[in-house]
Image (cartoon, coloured by chain):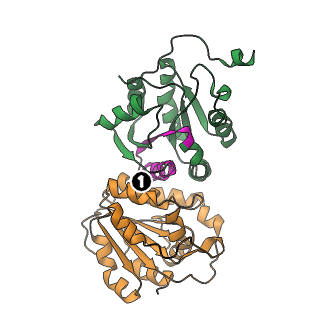
Chain colours: A orange, B green
Amino acid sequence: MMKRDECFRILARHITDEAVVATYSSAVDWVEINPRPLNYLSIGAMGLDSSHGLGLALGRPDKRVVVLQGDGSLLMNLGSLVTIAAVAPKNLVHLVAQNDTYEANGGHPIPNPKVDFAGIARAAGYAAAYDFSDLRIFEQQVGHVLEQDGPVFATLHVEPSKPLKYDYPSLYDPAKRKAFKAALQARNVRQGPKRKS
Amino acid sequence: MEAIAARVDAGPRELNGGGIIAAIKASGVEYVLAVPDIVTSAGLLAPIARDKELRLIRVCKEDECIGIASGLSYCDKRALILIQHTGFLDSLNAIRGVAVEYQQPICMMVGLLGHDPEKQPRASPRYGVRIIEPILDDMGIAHHLISADADIGKIQPAIETAYRESQAVAFLIGRRPKAS
């Protein structure tokens, strides 16, 4: 079993100009590890992060979009897997940290910890779907996951983390969304689907 | 007396789907995000699905539309959400969080299922329809009733305002639009 923050530290080494959509516990870990204007924090309507990611991927086909979702969040928007697979954005990478709990809401278990998210994504029609539970293998393969044509899905099987500090005023801060939009509009030369890692 | 007072003004009562679609396009909308709704099915959704100037994204559940439209707006792409009032009610938390609290330009076209088009929505025989306008008022979301061709002119200015001011707007479709 991996730890989410360890996965994200490895992921951060591969992130350059991608738009990263993160929610709740994943957002707390991600902004601590990799604070940057191109982070979009999807807080306030749990489950919508995958849909935000789809909108961004459609709107900016030249840019990679990486969604960092939790298992409880995806369960609230499972249909988005079907929608994303149908739209088939090549520039969307959808990573779900599965710790089998609603970590931001008291650590209660999700309804069925045996759920196979990668299997559901594969059946929905994602271009590729992976399961990672070994940090070393994730480290070896994350570059490939990020650069192949999407939509790509991966479940990161992680432990529940130590109690996190949810700084909601900071996570909600409108200035962050404004900075995100400005950064998104600053066109740059790196391309989405076919870039080299 | 109340029922009489609640009736909309007399006059020609038709709603042309082609006119609505033209107004949507004139507003710079490129994407229509939709879950089928029987009120708008034949007059709007079916012709939109055939229209090469609009990209239709069919979603599984209405609240997905709120996230997708928000993501598109960050890329300066305009979207219209085409749903039934039941889907609007199901999406209230997403609308609250994204459209209202995040002040995103979320444009919704909402079919009023079961509504009597000769009445105002607040006087609808359907409970689910009667509560739509009060909910929108409480949430501070601008809304416009589109029940006749004369109402179509409200669409473009309202969408322009929504994107200029980064705020939500809802168009309530009170009559089945005719396909044209």
- Residue at 32% of width from left, 58% of height from top? A89
From this view, report whether residue A90 is shown above or below residue A70. above
From this view, report whether residue B165 is shown above or below residue A193. above
**Quarter of the picture holding the C terminus of chain A:** bottom left
Q: Which one is nearer the viewer's eye here, A46 or A64? A: A46
**Chain letter behind tag 1:** A
Task: Determine whether, in the image, residue B23 is placed left or right of residue A41.
Answer: left
- Residue at 48% of width from left, 31% of height from top? B39
Number of numbered discs: 1
Residue B167 visible? The answer is no
Q: Which one is nearer the viewer's eye here, B119 or B104? A: B119
**Which amino acid does the dot numbered 1 rest on?**
Gly
- Name the secondary structure under disc 1: helix
Specify whether residue B149 is painted magenta.
no
Principal secondary structure, stretch drawn in magenta: helix
Q: Which one is nearer the viewer's eye here, B155 or B163? A: B155
Q: Which residues are magenta?
A: B62-86
- Residue at 45% of width from left, 53% of height from top? B71
Task: Determine whether, in the image, residue A70 is placed left or right of residue A171.
Answer: left
Specify whether residue B72 is painted magenta.
yes
Furthest toward the top, the residue is B11
Which residue is under mark 1?
A55
In x, y percent, where is residue A81? 40, 60
In x, y percent, where is residue B180? 35, 22
Residue B124 falls in image quadrant: top right
In x, y percent, where is residue B69? 46, 48
Task: Determine whether, in the image, residue A161 is placed left or right of residue A88.
Answer: right
